[in-house]
């Protein structure tokens, strides 16, 4: 009889190699699945995973797609290290964009360098406020943050729909459900003239470096890891699990809100019903692909960004449906979790006693 046996000490090399193995297996399985569905599986997988890296004109698209994924995943990873499972980053991303857009609309007739920073602060506070709800319910009532954060996402989506179809609708927008376009002082500046690469991309890298320093070099990062790995030892050492819960959820919400504001003030330039892009959910995959390490998350963000960019390419070249991108992302998470199990456990035969 087969049984799972926990390895005494999982291989460190395999622990960090498994994301690369998962990407390779995902490509292989995707090739087989698309071929069975009647598509050119080889060219589909090539366009999704390789073309965005091989064609330099696609690199700006990769950066634009990777930046929000990295920022959101950094906040989620801090919570995951403490066993605080924030699944509602998509809602916090939306609320951050809503809060920042509120500042943009209130300052629409104004000019000044201070407007965009004010929008960014509002975005952070909006995401934190939305994350504070599951934090309060977890700490005070022991309600699972998984359910509350996830359910609040749909509340945020409906709030967005109400605003862009009602009080925030652009009076000059021919009745389309959207806000006014942001002004020059309300949009992220491009890094180069005529380029899609905006200020949010280097900011994402800076946040990743700061998060690494926080988690690896400070007492706060140590407290997060101890609460996640050994709650009893954390209590004995004087670390408060409730404080860590509040801190990690607020950090995750704030970064998701900042990413939402960057998207609204960058690629979108306004709020529309299409603003919920699924980045908050995809960032969960990014966090695990990066091994919850801030520097690894940058790698994971680029890989998942490639599935977005490559998915759009494959829709044109191979006629893949739009849902193929989501399928690839889900398959990648499934394979990554499967390889993690094999790193920590091995399969053996259970000998029955005579």
Image: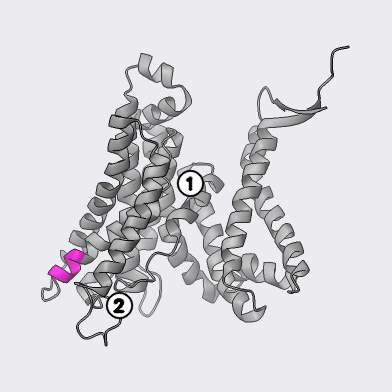
Q: Which is more foreground, mark 1 or mark 2?
A: 2
Q: Is residue 106 magenta?
A: yes
Residue 27 position by quadrant: bottom right
Magenta stretch: give its range: 102-107
Mark number for residue 295? 1
The residue closer to the viewer here, 42 or 115, is 42
Residue at left offset 21%, top offset 56%: 122
Q: Which residue is mark 2?
A: 177
**Where residue 290 sits in the image (x, y, percent)?**
53, 46
Label 2: state its secondary structure.
Answer: loop
**Where residue 53 sits in the image (x, y, percent)?**
59, 67
Label 1: state its secondary structure.
Answer: helix
Residue 226 position by quadrant: top left
The residue closer to the viewer here, 49 or 169, is 169
Q: Does residue 19 appear in this view? A: no
Residue 158 position by quadrant: bottom left
Residue at left offset 29%, top offset 65%: 160
The relative height of residue 237 versus residue 144 in the rendered view (above or below) is above
Residue at left offset 70%, top offset 36%: 342
The relative height of residue 151 versus residue 308 in the rendered view (above or below) is above
Q: Is residue 185 left or right of residue 205?
A: left
By secondary structure, the bulk of the magenta-drawn segment is best described as helix
Q: Does residue 99 appear in this view? A: yes
**Where residue 200 sits in the image (x, y, percent)?**
35, 62
The relative height of residue 344 versus residue 119 in the rendered view (above or below) is above
């Amino acid at each position: 009889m087969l049984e799972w046996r926990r390895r005494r000490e999982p291989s460190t090399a395999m622990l960090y190699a498994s994301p690369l193995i998962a990407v390779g297996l995902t490509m292989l399985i995707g090739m087989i699945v698309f071929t069975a569905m009647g598509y050119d599986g080889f060219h589909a997988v090539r366009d999704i995973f390789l073309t965005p890296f091989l064609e330099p004109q696609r690199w700006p698209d990769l950066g634009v797609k990777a930046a929000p994924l990295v920022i959101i995943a950094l906040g989620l990873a801090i919570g995951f290290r403490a066993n605080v499972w924030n699944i509602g980053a998509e809602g916090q991303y939306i609320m951050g964009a809503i809060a920042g857009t509120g500042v943009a609309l209130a300052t629409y007739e104004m000019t000044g360098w201070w407007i965009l920073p004010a929008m960014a602060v509002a975005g952070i506070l909006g995401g934190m406020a939305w994350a504070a709800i599951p934090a309060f319910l977890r700490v005070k009532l022991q309600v699972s943050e998984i359910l509350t954060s996830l359910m609040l996402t749909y509340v945020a989506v409906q709030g967005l729909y109400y605003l862009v179809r009602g009080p925030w609708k652009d009076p000059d927008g021919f009745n389309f459900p959207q806000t006014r376009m942001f002004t020059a002082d309300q949009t992220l500046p491009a890094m180069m003239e005529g380029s899609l690469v905006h200020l949010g991309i280097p900011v994402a890298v800076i946040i990743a470096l700061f998060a690494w320093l926080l988690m690896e070099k400070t007492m706060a990062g140590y407290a997060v890891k101890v609460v996640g790995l050994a709650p009893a030892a954390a209590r004995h050492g004087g670390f408060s699990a409730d404080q860590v819960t509040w801190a990690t959820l607020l950090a995750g919400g704030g970064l998701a809100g900042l990413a939402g504001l960057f998207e609204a003030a960058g690629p979108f330039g306004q709020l529309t019903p299409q603003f919920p892009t699924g980045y908050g959910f995809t960032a969960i995959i990014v966090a695990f692909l990066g091994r919850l390490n801030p520097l690894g998350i940058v790698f994971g963000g680029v890989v998942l960004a490639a599935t977005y960019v490559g998915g759009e390419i494959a829709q044109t070249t191979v006629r893949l449906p739009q849902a193929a991108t989501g399928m690839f992302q889900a398959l990648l998470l499934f394979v990554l979790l499967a390889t993690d199990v094999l790193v920590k456990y091995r399969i053996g035969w259970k000998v029955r006693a005579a």
